[in-house]
Image (spheres, helix red, strand yellow):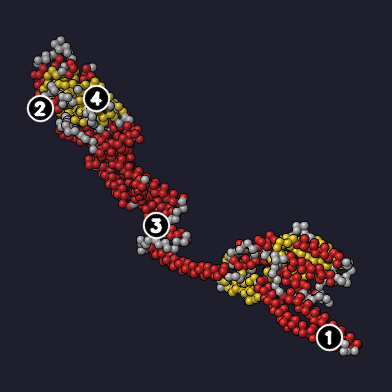
Amino acid sequence: MTKLHTRPVKTPWLAALLMFCVGIINLSVPALAAGQKLLIHNANIFMVGGVYHLDADVEYALTRPLVEALINGVGLTFDMQIEVIKVNEWWLNTELATITQRNRLAFHALSRQFVVENLNTNVLETFPDLTSALRYQGRVQNLPILDVSLLDEDGDYRIRVRVDLARDELPLPLRARGYFSNAWQLSSDWRIWELR
Amino acid sequence: MGTSLKRFTLKRFTLKRFTTGLLPVIGLFVLMLVSLYLISDAMQNATRFGRLYIWLLLLSTVLLVLFGVLIGFNLWQLVRQVLRKEPGSRLTLRFVWLFVVLALLPATVVYGFSVWLLHRGVDSWFDVEVEHALEDALDLSRASLDLQMRQLRQRTEPLATVLADTPDLMTPLVLNDMLRVSNAIEVSLFGNNSRVIASASEISNSILPRLPGDSVLRLVSQGEAYVGLDPIKNAGLHIRLVFPVPSSPQNTEDRILQVLYPVSDRLSTLAESVQAGFGKYQQLVYLRAPLKQGFIFTLTLILLSGVMFAIWAAFFSSRRLTAPITELAEGTRAVAAGEYHKRLPVTKRDDLGMLVMSFNLMTERLADARDAADQSQRLVENQRTYLQTILNHLSSGVLSLDARLTLRTVNASASQILGLDLSRNVGRDLASLGREHPMLDHLCEAFEPMLNASHTDWQEQVNLFGPSGRKVLMCRGASLPAGEGQTGGHVIVFDDVTELIQAQRNAAWGEVARRLAHEIKNPLTPIQLSAERLRNKLQGNLPPQDAEILERSIHTIVQQVESMKTMVNAFGDYARTPVMEIAPLNLNTLIEELAELYKDETTHVRLQLDLDTNHPHIEADSVRIRQVLHNLIRNSLEAMENTQDGRIIISTRCLEESGAQFVTLNVDDNGPGFPEDLMDRLFDPYITSKTKGNGLGLAIVKKIIEEHGGLVWAVNSPSGACIRIRLLLIDVRRRSLAPRFEGNTA
């Protein structure tokens, strides 16, 4: 399920206020700010047939509580957020499109297999061990991002990619930990490409 | 400046409305309840408000912090009021404390039991037997599937050996045969790098075979076979078998055979059911601790919001309860400070409202009474001012004393007559004043018998010698009523009658002199003439013996008539008020001149002088003072005619008493002294113990001294007679005319 937003998104004041509150809380609660880092290796944006594509290898390193939760039947959802941003020289940047690739990692107790399901394509793969499952999940190849015709020729654009654990998809009792516990924080830095 | 002040006041007002107003806090509490309800709902069913769960938690926490700030602000205000000892603050604190304890105790008990029940309730969801049963079911499913997998492996493994010698071009046909023979749904052959060599599938829409994972490929590349159970989305469970294909001279490439077998529908359904149940139960067991924490956190939020609202309500209710009491206390303070017109607003009709109404009624009556008292006081003040004005304009001196003879009222004339500023001594008792002012002491001595005898009305004439000389005061006294709020005491009114008495005396003596001249002196001349005519007529006609008798009688008549004329003239001189020629006079010099005159005359009497070296200067008529000295010296000389070694001592002393500077002139002799029976009338005319003289000597002395504002009195000393004269010194006399005293009434 690829979402493509071409309408500029303005930040509403309420959201800004909430962001401010979260920012304040982030400053006051270190657990919210700091977390386990996911690493994006070999990331590359390339154009094939007028379409930008992405190649990347994401290194998922799960913490012990996350592995424990996984083994105990808690499914973990990971989001790869890809944003296309128009860079404005004299104004705030405009978010042109947001693509979210979502994978769900679960443990199938009966078969003792780790199951990776691409929630965008509903493709499901099973693996006898966690390492294989994470490696499979982290491999992104030839992922189409954006048709070049949607971009202005003289515009400056930026594409950025980030991977994180979708805390809102955790079971409700774990959601608070997802926000407030360091061990439940999994995210990568933004990887940025400039398009000129 | 004004605008900023207004804005500041408005902000303070808004803040106060927010912190103490009912509606904002009710709104806050309702918002808190809604938030908690949504949290609870999200805990029950995450699909509706699950996304908002964290935001709801944050909102509730922020609201709780707001409540905390509100309570803190209220508490700070209350503590400040208690420290300032504002009325009603202690009662509010006590109410708040009571309400908080009443709210906290049951809330804590309920919270404790709720937590305990929550632990028990959540724990009761889990059962070891159920857990074991589920694990057993899972193991059973696995055992069943393992059996099937082992059978399939035994059946499929030889197929890999078949493919060892099969060239790649033939493999599709072989794989189709295998698919048909083995009841598999997919049979695939992979080369290096997972290259698909050939594949046969029962699934119509499957284009590419399902690749085995890296770990499987790694396992197989090591020569091991892989048999595993694969859940396939929307296709149920499948058994995956992967075998390495032995190499041969025709096929040197490492090849892998993968066969997928479906698990029977029934077994798959049952196994999935067991998997789903086990997974759900396992997840539930894992989530037990976070679930409890979540419930307890929500419960704590609910309890805290309830408790905080209760605490705030305690503050609010306490203030509402104590507000009328606070107002009453402030009103009482205002009344104590004299604000009798203070009225409190009656907002309720309950008991406190009745109390407020009673307070208002009380203050109204107090105000009326105060107004009446003020009016009476103004009336009294007016009357007092009226009386004071009259008193101050009276020529008579007025003193009022209380029962303990303390000076209460004095008017200006009293101070002026007595030459003392008595207005400064109001409130002091007469005895202590008398000790400071001897003249007043003399006055008190004269009053005291009348005051102590409690005469209702009395009258007394008092002679004083003060700063302005001799004074004769006509005093009248009356007792003031006592009892029923009145302290009693006395009022004394006195007039300076010195000049009046002098004038009366002068007039009386003038009249006597005129009568004497008219009645006595006028017949004397005819008597004398008649006697002389009788002598002229009869002289020579009578025998010598009779002529001698006639001559002697006529001589006696003429002599006595002359004597009577002299006497009448002398009395006329005494009664006549001469024109005084007042001038500064050194009394010592005058005495010394006079003593020089008597030096030869007083052969049998020694005249001694003992004069003050300060040379007392007085303002007086030197002729008349000289006459005084003459009269006194002669009086003494005549009194000592038969006295051996007679002595007259004339002395002067400058003294000061009650602020009055005066000179005392003493004439002492060592004669027989004054007869005691004449002492009271010694200075009256024609009172004398001597055979000679006209009896006017001392009367003239007294008259002249009193005309000079002086005082004279006579005493007998052990050695003889003493005449004491007091005359004002010149500086004092001048000064005595200057001060004028204003009266004062206490």
Amino acid bearing label 2: Asn
Q: Gap between marks 2 and 3, in whole Å?
A: 84 Å
The residue to which callout 3 is attached is B323
Seen in the picture, residue B482 relative to A67 is either above or below; the reply is: below
Q: Are marks 1 and 3 in contact (CB under 8 Å)?
A: no
**Front position in the image: A45 or B76:** B76
The residue to which callout 1 is attached is B536
Q: Position of residue A139 (x, y in %)?
A: 22, 23
The residue to which callout 2 is attached is B205
**Front position in the image: B331 or B394:** B394
Q: Gap between marks 2 and 4, in whole Å?
A: 39 Å
Per the image, label 1 sits on a secondary structure element best described as helix
Dot 3: chain letter: B
Instruction: Give neighbour class at mark 1: few <14, some 14-19, many 20+ (Cα, 10 Å).
Output: few
Instruction: Give neighbour class at mark 2: few <14, some 14-19, many 20+ (Cα, 10 Å).
Output: few
Per the image, label 3 sits on a secondary structure element best described as helix
Q: Gap between marks 1 and 2, in whole Å?
A: 210 Å
